Every structure is written in structure tokens, then in C-alpha cells.
Amino acid sequence: MDITLANFQIKAIADLTAAMEQPNRDIILRSCTGSGKTIILTHFMDEYLKGNHKTVFVWLTPGKGNLEEQSKEKMDRYIHGSQTKLLSDIMTAGFEENDACFINWEKLTKKGNTALKDSERTNFIEHIRNARDNDLSFKIVVDESHQNDTIKADDIIDLFQSDKIIRCSATPKNYKDAVLIDIPEEDVIAEGLIKKLLIINENFEQHISVDDQITYLLDRAIAKQRELHSEFLNRKEEINPLIIVQIPNKSDALLDRVEEYFESKGITYENNALAVWLSDKKQNLEDIEKPNAEPIAVIIKQAVATGWDCPRAQILVKLRDNMSETFEIQTIGRIRRMPEAKHFESDLLDSCYLYTLDEKFTESVKLSLGKGALDAYKVFLKPEHRFFSLISEYKTDVPYPRDAKLSLKVIYKYFEKKYHVKSDISKNKALLEAYGYSFSEDIIDYTKSGFVSTLSKENIAELNDISIHEALNTHKHGKEYHHCVAEIGYKVNLDYNSTNTIVRKLFLKGLRCEFKILKIETRELYAFIINNKHLLVEDVRNAMADESLQLTLAIPKKTEKPIGFPLEMIFTYDGTAKSQTEFSKNVYKGYLSSAEKRSLPEKLFERYCENSKNVQWFYKNGDKGIEYFSIVYTDNFEKQKSFYPDYVIGTTDGKVWIIETKGGFTKSGDSEDIDKFTVKKFNVLKSYTDKYNLLGGVVRQDKQSGELCICTETYSDNIKSNNWKLLSDVL
């Protein structure tokens, strides 16, 4: 099964690889549920084992739910030919080089657990000792590490005497002196792996008095399930969204009432529409994770099995009794994955839904997810705006991966520009040698010789350089070659296989390619890559960033079509905000000043529109999806990107403006705009507004005066320039 790694996953693997070189023992990988943590770790382990001899990985999982078997099975699936073992395999065969061993903690720590009798425990410790006697070194991965912070768990880690422990969790504890690798949730959402938003209690009345929380909440959940299901069917997607009903741990009375409610709706165990997953009662769970499985609801208690993946789960109903329970972020994680690991470009389908009357729970969710969890209700477009339209541009639906062919060409062009390499290959070796590239057939390591009186950098630099030559051994140095190629690729977000192909096509004899720099034998290629790794990393990086090497491919045509404002939308807001004023100039009825997610520039701009006598109406555009207005532009790799300008404005004199807001300028005039593409976006916005006879610009705040300013003609990153005017003078 070949998996295309997302950008943030490639970066995480590179960060883990770099962290293994650091002196710190503990490495913490913090990533939200749904970020593909197992994919990241298994690929990292595979890369690391290929580049490092005498290594064994031990992956420790928490007790519940056979997680060690699931993780082993995933590694077998993702990594061809991986050498994986469970505890039973270790007990018979011991530890061997390149093993990835998946062990359930509790089989080692639980008193009275029959998995390891005392004699076997001794055996297990002996297997570790034997491995260490054979110079094997253990690297530990602690999965869901927050669940295993106990003294017993600590004792087990000590048995392995490992110099590296990778702890993974969505909610890690703070370890002193640990290298922290943090995967931003925004990156996971941007790649489409998890849902954009968690919507809490959609369309609830302001003041609720209910006779029966079960009926009240489940009625809404079922209505939402039907709405989602019919939208999936409309799109010819075979996905049956699942409702998770979570009941408190000690509440059998609630269980009976939930089952009765579902039965009254014709949702029963007998017709496979209902499933249950409790410690003493399990039904209809087989294949429940499949996108179109039959059950539309599953009843669970608080502790849903850790690591349970069911991407079609989209609705959580949290019932409460009078006991307050601790909030577990994992529970919300269960409804945040995207089926098919992609967004459907629809707010309805790309969100997940929580229904609960448990205020404590709601508060904890908001606290832990921040702007990822919001109150919501439906708003409708006012009649006078229903006939407005703009021409929207869309990327042609060509999947456009990071192009290895294009990268190959860019790297060749860079070598041509920097080292003057030619298609007459015979001279290229001498050219590269003159610039410091080594063509030794041995592997060369450098060391120093001489004596120093004080350990200063300067004194050490003046010592004699001694090069140590070692004859190339393809078995031994094969791992190092692999390690070097992977490192060159990671710097520019290319995976190992693409980078290896590029390197071989550029430098290896016998592979035909119009962009050829050298023609050397396989053995020489190994030595060339290993000896010149630092130069190659630098050159490949610079090649990718070089503006002058913009290579134009035949760009797929963009599509254009008229688009209006959506007739209805899910309006998300922060119910705890001080101000809940309705903005009367917004095109939607019921649009509040507490709208979220909004950046500070957006909030300031919306307030400006509401209070300006020149603005008749304003519309906040979405940031993704075919129902919103977009303009297409291309980046340096000729990759098409969609730009969704923030606002469309109608003025009292009948003009239409398109506005993009950006971070402001500090009091000293420094830019707070973090978007590298602002200039490109400004230019495409300008040509779009000129083409359709509209007006437009970028709005930013000048923090020195507190005023909003607009740039409409030529973009400048200097607020002092005349290109920036006061917004109130222009709009």
C-alpha cells in the first residue's frame, strides 16, 4: 500500500531524524488525533533503521484494545518488508537487528497478568541482556504516553537502557530537557485529514427547558445524520455518517433508555442499525469502521478504546448524569478524522457535531480546542442579495503533486547556473571538483591533529586536517547512502524514492535522462553522495528557492463560472464573547459581531463596515470550497493555488469592492503579515478587478495611529509609502 505523505508528515519525519542526533534523551511528538501519527512513526523508524546499524525499536502501547497488534499491522501494511514482532515472537526468537517490536505495557506490568509468568519475565529480561551483549541498541517509542506515566512503566523503560525515548500524545506531560516536535493542528486541517470545525449544539434555542435530554439530543443527532447522509449520496459518496452516543460509566438506567429511544425510531440491534461497545456487551461492531457500514449509531461509555479509528464517525452525543466526569480530548478525536482523508469542500460535510447539555464538558472542549470548537446556527441570505453574482475561478481538477520531474529540471538548471555544467559531460567533473566537490572512491572522514593550549574554536580551527579514507563497502555504506539521500530530500519536502530517482538520473551511468550532470558507476555514486552530502543539501535547497529558475510548464487552464452568495450557511460564533451585537449591514440575517473564526484585522474591518456611511452591505467569503468566490494564481513550482479574498463590499454609490485583510504594521513600522504570497495575491486581485471593472485592495492596520489603511495600486510592505491610504478616505 503506497501512501503519499503530507507535507507536515515529511517535516515531522525530518524533525524526528534530526532529534535523534541531539544529546537529549526524551523526544516528544505532539500531534492531534487524526494526524497520521502511526504513519509518521513507522516511516521514520523504517528510514532510521536503514541508516543505522545494530538498532531495535520497541514500541510500547497502552493496555486496552489490542493497540499493539493494530500498530504492527499498520507498519506491515505501510512499509514493505518491515521486520515487525509482537511479545510472543520476542519470547521465542529474542531481539534482532532492524526489529520493530510492538509490546502492550500491561502484559509486562500488570500483577497477576498471565502473559508473563515469573520465569518468562526472567526470560524477557534475559532477551534484553542478550541483545545488549550483541551490541544492539534500543530506541523506545511510547504511544499515548500520557496514559503510561507510572512508576512501573518507568521501570520497564529502564530495563532497555535506551538513550532515546520518543513519547507521543495529543496531550503530553511536560518533560524537562525534551526536544518537542509539535505538529500544528492547522497543518493537519489544511491537508484535509481532520475536520475543519467542531460545531457545538447547532441551532439550540437560547433557553432550553427539556423534559428528557435523551429525546432532545438524539432527535437532533438523527436529523443531522440524515442531512449529512443525503448530502454524501448527492455527491455519489458511499459514506454513512455515524453517531457516537456516550453514556456515563456507571449508568445502566441511561443505557436502557437510549436503547428504547432508538427502538422507537426503528434503529435496533436486530436490523444492524444500532451497535454497542461496552466491556460486557458488544454488538454489530464488525467492520463498523468501513465508510458505508450499516450501523448509524454506536453506544459507548467514557473510555472508548484508545486508538479506535472510525473516520465516518461525525456526530457525538454526550449524555450526562449528575456525576461530573473528566473530559478526554480523545473522545472528541473520534469524530474529527475525515473519511477518505480529504475535505469535501463543503462546510456541512467538513465539520463534526457535538450535542450535549453538559456545560462542564462544553467548556472543557472549548478550552482544549480553542477556535476549533464553536457555537453555531443557520443563517439565511437576505432577499435583496439573492441575485448578486461574481465570476469565480477554479483550479482545473488535475492533481498536482510536488513534481519530481520539475524538481529534477530545476536542480539541473541550478547546477548549470552556479557551476556552468554543460551537456558535454566530460568537463563537468572538473568543474564540480574546482568548486570543492569530492570524487574520491573511498569514504572520507575528517579529523584534526596537533595540540592546543586552550579549547577555543580558533585554536582548534588551526590544527591540521587529517582525512581518514575508508574503502567503500556497499553493505555497510548502503545505509549511509540511504540516510544522506533522505536528508537531501527532506529539506525540500521530497520523499526518499523521488530524491533517489533524481540523484540517479542526474549522476548515474546507464540511466537515460536529458538532464545529465555526470555518468558515474553505482559504487562511485555512493561515495559521491556520502562525501558531498553537505554541499548537495545546500545546492538542492537553493535550487528550489531560486526565483530566476521559474520554469513554465503548460499550465492547466482554470475554469470560470458565475457564483452568488450561498443562500444559507452555518454561522459560527463565540457565545462567551462580551459583545453579541447583530451587524445589520451583513448580507445574512442574524450575523453577530462575535463571529468566529476571525483574525483581528477581519474583526476591525467588519466593525469598520458596519459603522461606515459609505458601505451599504458586506459579505465574508469562505476560505475553501466551490461554494465560495476564488481567484487562481500559481506558485514557484507552477502549482495552481486558490485565493479566497476575505470580503466583498457594496458601497452606497453602487460600486463593488473585493478586499483582502492582512496582519498589521507595528508601531515601529515592522510588518506582521506572515503570508509569503501577499504580493502574488495582490497582483492577481488587481488584474481580476481591472478585468471585471471592480475595485479592490489589501487592508492592514497601522498600529502607530490605530487606523486601517488600504493599498489599491502598487503593493508595498512599507506603511510609510504613499501606496497606503487611510481606508476612510477611500472606501
Image (cartoon, rainbow, N blue to C red):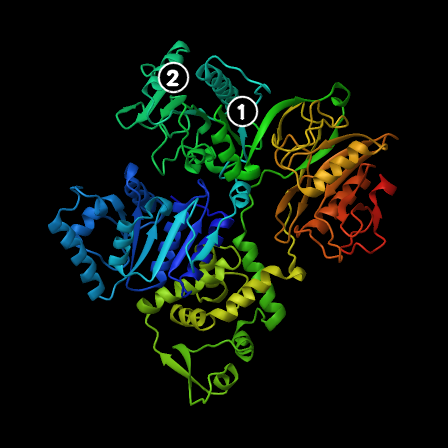
Residue nearest the observer in this picture, 188 or 491: 188
Q: How far apart are marks 1 and 2 (CA)?
A: 19 Å
The image position of residue 723, as x and y in percent, is 83, 52
The image position of residue 580, as x and y in percent, is 68, 29
The image position of residue 518, as x and y in percent, is 50, 70
Q: Relative to residue 397, is residue 49 drawn left or right?
A: left
Which residue carries the number 1 mark?
Answer: 201
Which quarter of the image is occupied by the C terminus? top right
Q: Relative to residue 593, is residue 696 drawn left or right?
A: right
Q: What residue type is labelled 1?
A: Asn
In the depicted structure, whether residue 58 falls above or below residue 506: above
Dividing the picture into quarters, in which one does residue 179 lie? bottom left
- Numbered badge on residue 395: none
Q: What is the tally of numbered marks visible in this picture?
A: 2
Which residue carries the number 2 mark?
Answer: 258
Q: Give the residue at x 41% y 81%.
A: 447
Mark 1 surroundings within 10 Å by alpha-carbon count, few (fewer than 14), some (14 through 19), many (20 or more): many
Q: Give the residue at x 42% y 48%.
A: 172
Q: Earlier in the sequence, mark 1 or mark 2?
A: 1
Q: Residue furthest left?
A: 119
Residue nearest the observer in this picture, 382 or 252: 252
